Image (cartoon, rainbow, N blue to C red):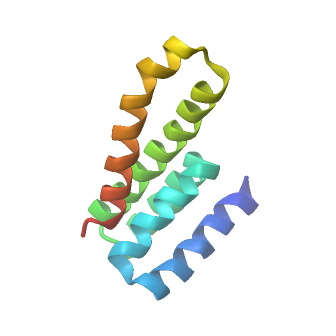
Amino acid sequence: MVVLVAGVGFAGYVLMKLLGPGKGIGVTGLLGGLLSSTAVTLSFAHRGRGGVEPVTAARAIVAAGMANAAVKGAMVLVLGGGSLRRAIAPALGGMLVAGIGLAFVR
């Protein structure tokens, strides 16, 4: 877990340098949430105390949670039956659009 948190922190640092602080943090939250929303939460909770605005850190944590839920929803889509797929697909699509939008909102 320590290595995962450190990896998310390093990826966040690189993305903030490449995309700027606002977009880099959002993208880090979204992509990091695909692996572990817990690691993103720990990493950005620490950053929230050390210089990153708490609202920005919270946005990354929410994006991570949404990405993690999207992965689980995608597994339901793949493994579930036809009626379950039809029921969950619109909600999963809306969550995906909201998560991407959240990652890029300043």
Q: Quadrant of residue 3?
A: bottom right
Asked whether residue 41 appears in the rendered view, the answer is: yes
Q: Residue furthest left?
A: 106
Classify residue 8 as left or right of residue 46: right
Where residue 79 sits in the image (x, y, percent)? 67, 23
Q: Residue furthest front?
A: 82
Vertical placement of residue 83 versus 37, above or below: above
Asked whether residue 50 appears in the rendered view, the answer is: no
Vertical placement of residue 33 versus 3, above or below: above
What residue sits 33% from the left and 75% below the top? 22
What residue sits 70% from the left and 59% below the top? 4
Give the position of the C terminus as an image quadrant.
Answer: bottom left
Q: Quadrant of residue 6?
A: bottom right
What residue sits 57% from the left and 35% below the top? 74
Vertical placement of residue 106 versus 21, above or below: above
Number of labelled discs?
Answer: 0
What residue sits 62% from the left and 75% below the top? 10
Where residue 104 sits in the image (x, y, percent)? 32, 66
Where residue 69 sits in the image (x, y, percent)? 50, 36
Classify residue 36 as left or right of residue 103: right
Q: Residue furthest bottom?
A: 17
Q: Nearer the viewer, residue 50 or 33?
A: 33
Classify residue 22 as left or right of residue 10: left
Q: Nearer the viewer, residue 29 or 5?
A: 29
